[in-house]
Image (tube, rainbow, N blue to C red):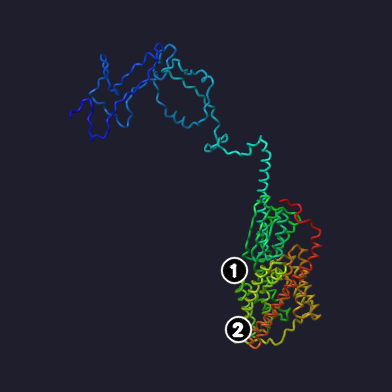
Amino acid sequence: MSQDPQQESFDPRIPEAPVEVSAIPVIRPAHADSDPVTSPAPAVPDAALDPVETDAATGMVEMSTEPVADSPLTQPPLSEPVTTSVLAPADGNGRVPAPQAVPDPDANALEAFADAALHEPQLEESGFADAPFAVPGERSRGRRLPRPRLRRSPKPAADPNPDRVVYGEHMPTQAIALVERLGSSAYGRRMRSRLSARKADQDAAVDARTTLDFALKLGETMFSFGASSMDVESSIIVVTQAFGIHEIEIDLTNQAISLNYAPDSSRGEVPYTLQRVVRSWSTNFAGLGLLHRLVEEIADGETTRAEAQRRLVEIRRTPKPFPAWSEVIMAGVFCGLFVPFIGGTWRGALVGMVSTWIVFWLKIKVEKRGLPEIFSTMLGSFLATTIALTLHAVNVGIDPSLVIAGGIMILLPSSRFVAAVQDAINGFPLTAAGRLTSALLGYMGLMGGIMIGVIGSEIAGLPTLDLAEAPTGSELPAIVLMLLVACAAMSDSIVEQATWKALIASGLVASAAYGVWLLFDGIGTGPRLTPAIAAMAVGFLGRIAALRLGFPQIVVVLPSMLFLLPGLAIFRALYEFTVESGSTLLGVAGIFNATVVVAAIAGGVVFGDILARPLTDRIFVGSRPATGAGHVR
């Protein structure tokens, strides 16, 4: 097959594609005397790009036999340079302005223009009005409308922070409150009232939650400081009612506090159920007194919720009034004062004081290491028993039973016994069961340590004790014994971290209770009923003195009742149960009797507190305003 000479052959070895033949029209200016409709603009050939040639005689197209050279890929295709006069319109006489050379842009000018701030361009009214408009049907072929002149706004002052982006107007898509669309309608006022009420309900819900959190934290703090369940519940009720939270139920279960807030559903408020578990205790009677006064001020309407919250934080952060080492020192002083009270010698009092220092210090150390209380109490009673029996074996001249009795008095869980009985009487059976279980565990640890110490001394070959003779009591004058009781109560107040006012009140109440004990013991009421009657005096007088000074009654009652506890009876019963094989039943009976006396003392304290309530209500509560007066939620 013959190859067409006018058609380029395709060679697959050549990677470039063949150049297509194209014609690029060039715009020419229109003349004033020519009609754009009847006189078309002549074609302008381009020798570089258009290989098509036209014969002048025949008008036929002659194809060039020479192929057009390929343009490089990195350069744009060649074109005829268009002068400035082509783009400029002709004047009224049809004359085209002469071409003008376009100067190259200055690099410095371009850089300055790039750094300039852009502003909203504004059209100049005069330039825009003078610009010609193209009207259909008029002679506008080949003409270009002049571009309106632009006028830039004055450059603003320099921004001290050029990187900051500032929007001068709202975004057009910004959301709006739909209720504003009802401003001119008949429903506008009603909807605004409804939204205001809804916002008030939301604010009330937030206030309710804040009040519940405050009441919960207050109850937790009181529990950890050593308050009874009755005091905790009363304080929570005062706080919630004073700050406007009325639909609330309180549940105290051992160491858990639960608050259930169930408002009326018609108000649209959110119900809450909050709970907090108290996992650690640190006796702080001074802090408990501060909390008691805070609750009194809330009940009187003298403190707002914000102020009460601030004061609660301060109370929780306030250090105890006495350093930690003072607790150890005063525990030994208590033992040294109690030994002569039950008939011991002053030498025995000194031995008991030193041994109690060792026992109490070691007990605190092992509890900080994580040892449970039952084992720390067992260790303390074991050391107290071993030290007393060892010194008795070397003929120091002491009665070990009295020394041990004085040493274990500070280890007895007397506060939990009293709190358990009080909770059971006041309607907290689960909490009372939990406290009683905890107290019994401490009691068992105490007895276990004494038994281990007695058995160890017997194995070591130490001489046994002769407990056939009953203790005759102290031969000191009654006034001296009364002073010993008062000083012992004050010493235990320091151990419990009470203030000086509570310390003095405890000493006075203990002295008065000892006077009652002497009175009824002289009448012959017996060794079991006499301590209970004296405990009633402690509860009665302790409540009056505590409320007069602004403390809960347990702050004064607990140190004042310790002299009534049967420490000597506990040791004698355990010794008979452990060593004397023929007196096992007597030992069991003695343990039971001692436990009954402890329970009777706790019950007497609670009963005396109940007897004093009508009197204290008339004296200290009758002049107060109603609870919640002056408070608005």
Image location of residue 397, percent across then percent down: 68, 84
Quadrant in the rendering for residue 461: bottom right
Q: Nearer the viewer, mark 1 or mark 2?
A: 2
Nearer to us in this view, 191 or 571 = 191
Quadrant in the rendering for residue 285: bottom right
Q: Which element is circle 1 on? A: helix
Image location of residue 460, percent across then percent down: 58, 85
Q: Amino acid at mark 1?
A: Lys
The reply, left or right, for residue 60 in relation to residue 602 is left
What residue is drawn where x is 49% and y is 18%?
A: 131
Q: Amino acid at mark 2?
A: Ile
> Which residue in the protein does label 2 denote?
455
Q: Which element is circle 2 on? A: helix
Seen in the picture, residue 50 relative to 615 is either above or below; the reply is: above
The reply, left or right, for residue 478 in relation to residue 307 is right
> Which residue in the protein does label 1 denote?
368
